[in-house]
Image: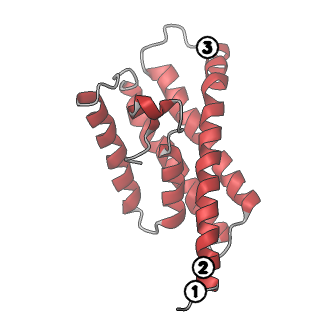
Amino acid sequence: MVLIRGHHFPLLRNIVPGASWAVFFLAGMYLNAPLALAGFLGLAVGLDYAAIEWGGTSAFCVSPAYIALLPAYASLWLAGRGYRLGWGLERIAHFPLAFCGLLGTLVCDVISSGSFYLYSGHFSNPNWSEYLARSTQYLPRCLVAMGLWLSLATLIHSLLLVRRRNPVHH
């Protein structure tokens, strides 16, 4: 997340999609300690603070709605945990992983985008049609980013499983 929190690196913004949402999902999937969620939440806030204070990133997204990122990111964490509890990590169950990733992404988006739309103070007359129009503008990018990072994680996970089952002896 430190390396690829997309919106903090203008050069990468249009090349590499941000990985934060996938990091929360994968942390839920791989890390058993619930305190890890708190650590990643703190890291995300710290990265945002550093990017705004020292990196020249706009503070536009920091508003009263910012606090909603806690349950938004937690929903990704829980979706990752749900996958692990339901299907384990001994092999990747592609459809359930995609479903959990999609569900987590949709819930996270509704919480984060919805709260920003309603409570940021940037929109004078919130209404469903405008929210849906904005959502259809930004949600596809979030889905592509999640799909990319989960695909990469799945590839790495699968390669590690193959290597563990077929160790190379020297």
How many discs appear? 3
Residue 105 percent coordinates (x, y): 61, 43
User: Mark 2: which amino acid?
Assistant: Arg
Along the polypeptide, which appears first: circle 3 or circle 1? 3
User: Mark 1: which amino acid?
Assistant: Val
User: Which one is closest to the eye, mark 3 or mark 1?
Assistant: 1
Examine the rendered structure and indicate whether residue 122 appears above or below residue 143.
above
Residue at point 54%, 49% (across, down): 22
The residue carrying mark 2 is 163
Residue at point 49%, 7% (across, down): 124
Along the polypeptide, which appears first: circle 2 or circle 3? 3
User: Mark 3: which amino acid?
Assistant: Asn
Q: CA distance from mark 3 to mark 1?
A: 60 Å
How many residues crowd around disc 2 within 10 Å: few (fewer than 14), some, or many (20 or more)? Answer: few
Residue 85 sits in quarter: bottom right
How many residues crowd around disc 1 within 10 Å: few (fewer than 14), some, or many (20 or more)? Answer: few
Can you tell which mark lies on residue 168? 1
Residue 72 percent coordinates (x, y): 50, 41
Along the polypeptide, which appears first: circle 2 or circle 1? 2
Can you tell which mark lies on residue 127? 3
In this view, the residue in front, 102 or 63, is 102
Q: CA distance from mark 2 to mark 1?
A: 8 Å
User: Which one is closest to the eye, mark 2 or mark 1?
Assistant: 1
Residue at point 33%, 36% (across, down): 48
Examine the rendered structure and indicate whether residue 104 appears above or below residue 80.
above
Residue 101 percent coordinates (x, y): 64, 50
* Mark 1, secondary structure of its residue: loop
